[in-house]
Image (cartoon, coloured by chain):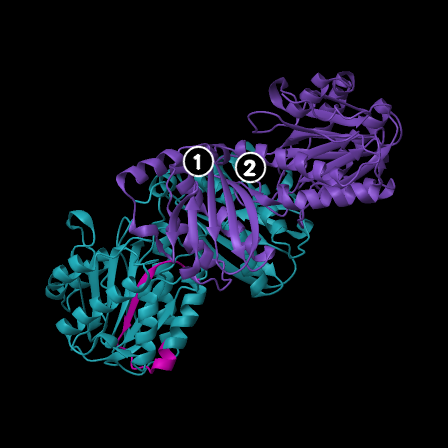
Chain colours: A cyan, B purple
Amino acid sequence: MAVSVTAPAGFRAGGAWIGIKAGGALDAAFVGSADGEPVVAAAVFATTDSPAAPIEVSRAHLAGSGRRVRGVVLTSGNANAATGEAGRAAARRLLEAAAHAFGGRAEDYLIAQTGLIGISFPIDAALAGFGALTASVGVDERSAETAARAIMTTDTHPKTALVEGDGFRVGGLAKGAAMIAPQMATMLAVITTDAAVEAERLDAALRAAVETTFNRITIDGCSSTNDTVVALASGRGRSPGEEFEEAVREVCAQLAHQIVADAEGGSRVGVVRVLEARDEDEALLIARQIANSLLVKASLLGGDPYWGRVLAEVGAARRGVDPSGVRIWYQGMLVAEGGLEARGGWSANEHEELTRRMAQPEVDLAVALGRGSASATVLTSDIGHGYLEENRRTS
Amino acid sequence: MAVSVTAPAGFRAGGAWIGIKAGGALDAAFVGSADGEPVVAAAVFATTDSPAAPIEVSRAHLAGSGRRVRGVVLTSGNANAATGEAGRAAARRLLEAAAHAFGGRAEDYLIAQTGLIGISFPIDAALAGFGALTASVGVDERSAETAARAIMTTDTHPKTALVEGDGFRVGGLAKGAAMIAPQMATMLAVITTDAAVEAERLDAALRAAVETTFNRITIDGCSSTNDTVVALASGRGRSPGEEFEEAVREVCAQLAHQIVADAEGGSRVGVVRVLEARDEDEALLIARQIANSLLVKASLLGGDPYWGRVLAEVGAARRGVDPSGVRIWYQGMLVAEGGLEARGGWSANEHEELTRRMAQPEVDLAVALGRGSASATVLTSDIGHGYLEENRRTS
């Protein structure tokens, strides 16, 4: 796997079992500055009226620290959401343990948590086991990989990315699986960079990157209580040019793609591209309408280019699009134009070719609205039987 | 089964195979005035930018006829949607055949069609077989039942309803199964009444009834290109009091419930009731957010009272609801309050009782927001493996 958050200079990471998950599976990670001193930080949180305790605590700490933190604690197995004041106290106590281990005050740390909602967080067990997390932390590749593994819930593999710029690097790790939808994509991620950037620039780069990456993926259309993306900049490298913003976007894009490709019970990624819209907002709205359609997802499961459902969603979006101006391609093959089946149907050879292309693990679905030049892309996944099995029970 | 559209005085109905579906399954129905003369009519159609041909034709005919029609032709197996001018011509030719058989002009008839989208409607076969539909029409109960069966697609049983008022009756038939979501509930329905009402009153009664019944059910959150509800009033009975509007609403409510209970691949109905909202709009918006959640539907499939997902959706609705004021009940048992698990959890006996109640075919999910006195109810279904199998392929 690619090295990730420890590849940029000035970071360390680790992962361990601290007692949240039954059975000893990795359930806690740490990503922070290598020397224990504060670094520039930015974060984007879930837009929800029901934020989990870690979001409330992290938001307060980020504001209180002047956007300079020493590290991030991440846990999996219990979201610490809908847990009230006890949950917030538990989050703060975990950060007190981090401060005790890595230096500074609890307020110098952020926290991100993922897992089941509405179940008391087992803080006593986690504190008793916290030493294992402390001991796991290192600046090597293996430590970063362990951190990426430790934040997984129903993910089947860890998600990491690395982009090298001119004199700086941007690394990242993430977890996803389900409850993935804008705004924002439900997930946890940590981005690290050794670029010398101020808090304002890091914040702006992160927000712009999230908008066109994590916020443009959907698995089940459900939003979470815990979404958190944190970026840390050590300043050990040079002050970068515009390529910095692109590098941050690229790391986020790679992680976003990995999240959709590892969707709970999913087997296929759908790249929904809406073209020839009046403006980007329109393109994005219609792309999301299509990407969130359960019928489109079911077609994706079956590898079936059922463009009628796509056209139905364009109409359901109620943007006043004239169906007779719409063209639809699956995997580069034009299947509908003028609101009708393209060319009146397929030859046997063409049908065979389309079936072959639809069997790929990634399917490109392009929809041209014929009324402008704006476009937007949303990544989606099919909904498979595994999703239903994974989510029919709380655990 | 209950008698339906022929129970009110002055109506006849029928159903037959006219050649749309392969294999000879019933695929066409007719509901019209018993004497062939025009009766008062009203209709509500799908709100979409991609209306199917039958909606375009029916809309024009209803307006052109001064809201008096002789009958409705309904077909199943092919939606005649995304079929362009050829589709509109096919719809008009079917109504010409109806006029030839039952009297008057094509413009005196409405048409509603359901089935696959984007496939040329087999008009020549349907016209050749139309005589079978003509021959099937009668004023008896059996004819109404046959009509209800003939509009089914993936429905597992016909849907009918009848309410008796003081000196009048209201009957109805409907089809549903999937692509059921506001606005409006995706489906076809015909309501008949012998009440003596003017077109304006019939229209107002129908619109009000649709708003609180068909528009408050969801199966997969997908909207269709073909939704149509038609109401016909023969005027043979008396001029009714306010109970007329309630009778129309009751017939629509019964049909709506039957549609959700027969959801494609579904096994359980969820009655999502949002209480103590600031106003009805807020209650309805949050009820829909919960009812459309794939994770809530997956919980319903598993009979799992996972209230954390419900609270997450309340937050995702972004109405500014304070989670600490929210209480949640599954099947009358309080599972969450103050944003936390109620009473800190369940005794073994309580857990057993809740599990037993969750196994019922209909589950009541009540969510009190604690900030007002308005409420709204939305009916939903679980999403089961059968839904995925039904919808992974075009046919």
Identify the image quadrant of the C terminus of chain B: top right
Residue picked out by circle 1:
B384
Which numbered disc, 1 or 2, marks the residue that appears first in the sequence? Answer: 2
Residue A6 visible? The answer is: no
Q: Looking at the rendering, which quadrant does residue A80 occupy?
A: bottom left
Image location (x, y in percent) of residue A184? 43, 62
Q: Nearer the viewer, residue B101 or A59?
A: A59
Amino acid type shown at disc 2: Ala
Left or right side of A166 for B28: right
Image location (x, y in percent) of residue A70? 22, 76
Looking at the picture, does residue B389 appear above or below residue B225? Answer: above
Crowding near the residue tagged with mark 2, few <14, some 14–19, many ≥20 C-alpha atoms within 10 Å = many
Looking at the picture, does residue A356 appear above or below residue A182? Answer: above
Left or right side of A380 for B211: right
Q: Looking at the rendering, which quadrant does residue A320 occupy?
A: bottom right
The residue lying at 49 percent from left, 58 percent from top is: B317
Image location (x, y in percent) of residue A239? 31, 83
Image location (x, y in percent) of residue A250? 37, 66
Residue picked out by circle 2:
B178
Looking at the picture, does residue B70 appear above or below residue A67? Answer: above
Residue A193 covered by magenta stretch: yes
Label 2 secondary element: loop
Q: CA distance from mark 1 to mark 2?
A: 12 Å
Amino acid type shown at disc 1: Gly
What segment is highlighted magenta in the picture?
A184-202
Q: Nearer the viewer, residue A227 or A159?
A: A227
Label 1 secondary element: loop
Q: Nearer the viewer, residue B352 or A95?
A: B352
Disc 1 with disc 2 on a shared chain = yes
Residue A115 covered by magenta stretch: no
Residue B235 visible? The answer is: yes
